[in-house]
Image: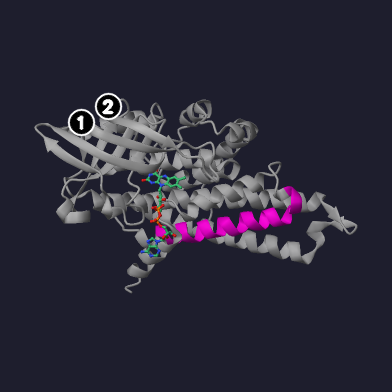
Amino acid sequence: MDFTLSEDEAAFRAKVREFAETEIRPIVPKLEKTEEFHWETVKKMAELGLFGLIFSKKYGGLELGYIYYAIAVEEISRVCGSHGITVASHNSLCSNHINIAGTEEQKLKYLTPLAKGDKLGAWALTEPNAGSDAGATQTTAVLDSDEWVINGTKQFITQGSVAEIYVVIASTDKQKKQKGISAFIVEKGTPGFRPGQLEHKLGLKISDTSELIFEDCRVPEENMLGEKDNAFYDVMKILDGGRISIGAMALGLGQGALDEAIKYVKVRRQFGKPIGKFQAIQWHLANMATEIEAARLLIYRAAYLANKKSVKYTKESAMAKLYASEVGMRATRLAVQILGGLGYTKRAVVERHMRDVKLCEIGEGTSEIQRLVIARLLGI
Ligand SMILES: Cc1cc2nc3c(=O)[nH]c(=O)nc-3n(C[C@H](O)[C@H](O)[C@H](O)COP(=O)(O)OP(=O)(O)OC[C@H]3O[C@@H](n4cnc5c(N)ncnc54)[C@H](O)[C@@H]3O)c2cc1C
């Protein structure tokens, strides 16, 4: 058992950290105000290969696997959660669904531009009446000669209004409930499909989140992704990988908050000394650092198992996501506390991190759902 990163992994971490510090940190405050999705940085992240880390070279990826992927999401999120979720959702959800379930033609046509970062992807599962109960999807797809006709509304979809390739989950047999669910690839501009209302959120303000509306949207029969009626099984596999990235996002936000707090306690003086000399503050920082390290280990273990491909890692990724997101929430909240009044203002990075990390306890299965998954796998 080796708990250290390899030289290449450590060099990759340093490269992504430098990129995030120089290319992302300076632009975030202005973009947060305008809630503007930033294509220029997305293009630069694509040039760095961040949209193809887990995909085969055959499809334009870097084939570096989940440890590199977790490192990338952590380092980007350490500086900005919005850019972190762009990397996370593009890779883990839309692209990986095509990677796992796509035919060779689908992978060449759709995964290749996604893995190279030439196009952005979005993954549409959640609906107004189907959130945690994803199997209750009401969007329908009906075969009409050689085309699928999709009708329904999706909500809270990351990259919903900016993506060019969408994976959409729809019911193909209502009677069979979750055993009658299929997945479809839908391209931007397909008649009958349009992004709906944009969400204005508590955090992740630079990330695009929107509704998707399908009104007699017709896609070719060959755009079905995976087997008919069997997509729910693939969705569960996609979420196993996705939860590693949401965990890594929370980890990065927690680490970013800890780093800010450590810097601050050395320079802020009260009662004649730096506040870092007070034991109460030291205990907060020690707890934050310990929990963050434990979260990192859980994430790397899940990533290690994901790299093996042949083993199931549902329990490990649910544990990593559950623990890291709650640690991220605690760490950012304590960082705000340590920065006092300043922590409550927009001048402090930790204020943004605290708002951003809340999503990690909700997206890709809430903390309550993670506990249900883990309990089920404990045989309860
Ligand atoms: C910023 C953002 C980005 C997102 N991006 C995407 C995306 O790209 N694609 C996508 O498909 N979805 C996306 N989502 C949706 C997200 O995955 C859902 O919001 C999440 O799964 C919860 O569903 P819900 O909001 O409908 O909450 P609900 O399912 O209505 O849950 C409400 C509350 O009830 C609890 N609850 C529900 N069922 C149970 C149960 N059985 N036991 C105990 N408690 C329960 C939940 O834990 C929660 O606290 C995104 C959401 C946000 C906010």
CA separation, marks 2 and 1?
Answer: 7 Å
Mark 1 lies on a secondary structure that is: strand
Residue 156 to residue 49: above or below: below
The residue carrying pointer 1 sits among few (fewer than 14), some (14 to 19) or many (20 or more) residues within 10 Å by Cα, namely many
The numbered mark at residue 35 is: none
**Mark 2 touching mark 1, by CB under 8 A?**
yes
Pointer 1 residue: 218
- Residue 90 on the magenta span: no
Left/right placement of residue 228 relative to residue 117 reads left
Q: Main secondary structure of the magenta part?
A: helix
Instruction: Give the quadrant of residue 289.
Output: bottom right
Mark 2 lies on a secondary structure that is: loop
Q: Would residue 61 be visible to someone looking at this image? A: no
- The percent position of residue 290, horizontal first and vertical second, equals 61, 62
Amino acid type, mark 1: Arg
Please state the extent of the stretch shown in magenta in the rendering: 317-342
Identified at 42% across, 52% down, the residue is: 243
Mark 2 or mark 1: which comes first in sequence? Answer: 2
- The percent position of residue 213, horizontal first and vertical second, equals 32, 36
Pointer 2 residue: 190
Identified at 47% across, 60% down, the residue is: 322
Count of numbered circles in the view: 2
